[in-house]
Image (cartoon, grey):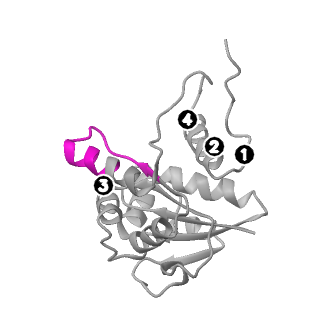
Amino acid sequence: MMKVIVGISGASGVIYGIRLLEALGQAPQVETHLVLSATGKLNITLETEYSVADVEALADTVHNDRNLAASISSGSFRCDAMVVAPCSMKSLSGIVNSYSDTLLTRAADVTLKDRRPLILVPRETPLHLGHCKLLYEAAQLGAIIAPPMPAFYNKPSSVEDIVDHTVGRLLDLLGLESGLVRRWDGA
């Protein structure tokens, strides 16, 4: 059984984390652990038609972001990867600086220290030098930086198509085939 931690932090773009949970839920070999920041919860209500309870129901296990004693806060918890989608600049800063005052940042810190894949989906634009520096430092620590940049070779016809392509690429990074990505086969 593959275990994936999904963090949804307070940046715009919570739909990426929600859609990732939906896609992971279709993979019977994957167990999901969800941690939502307080502003992630707020953005769910502001940006989507989902309720927080709807999103939590998509995960196998839900952890309170204030519970620093949760299973996912320890390196002894065996997981295969963590994805933070979206990743706010605040969460990015906490991860890069090992400032683990929330479960989301602690779980990411543990993921890095144990050399497991940590995939960050930063959602901010434009970026100032401080943001760029944090992204660079996260990559130096071993994180995979996967901003939600739309592809157009697949001729998306809806926002859902754009979101699905990004989520499909995230699943690629986890080694999971989703059917969400139209593969480029050359010109």
Q: Which residue is mark 3?
A: 89
Q: In the rendered structure, which amino acid carries the disc numbered 2?
A: Gly
SS at mark 1? loop
Q: Residue sitting at 33 percent across and 61 percent down? A: 96
For marks 1 and 3, give the CA distance: 28 Å
Mark toward the start of the polypeptide (2 vs 1): 2
Q: In the rendered structure, which amino acid carries the disc numbered 3?
A: Met
Q: Nearer the viewer, mark 1 or mark 4?
A: 1
Mark toward the start of the polypeptide (4 vs 2): 4
Q: Which residue is mark 2?
A: 168
For marks 2 and 1, give the CA distance: 6 Å
Q: Confirm or deny contact between disc 1 and disc 3 (CB under 8 A).
A: no
The x and y percentages for residue 82 are 54, 62
Q: Which mark is residue 162?
A: 4
Q: Confirm or deny contact between disc 2 and disc 1 (CB under 8 A).
A: yes
The x and y percentages for residue 24 are 68, 58
SS at mark 4? helix
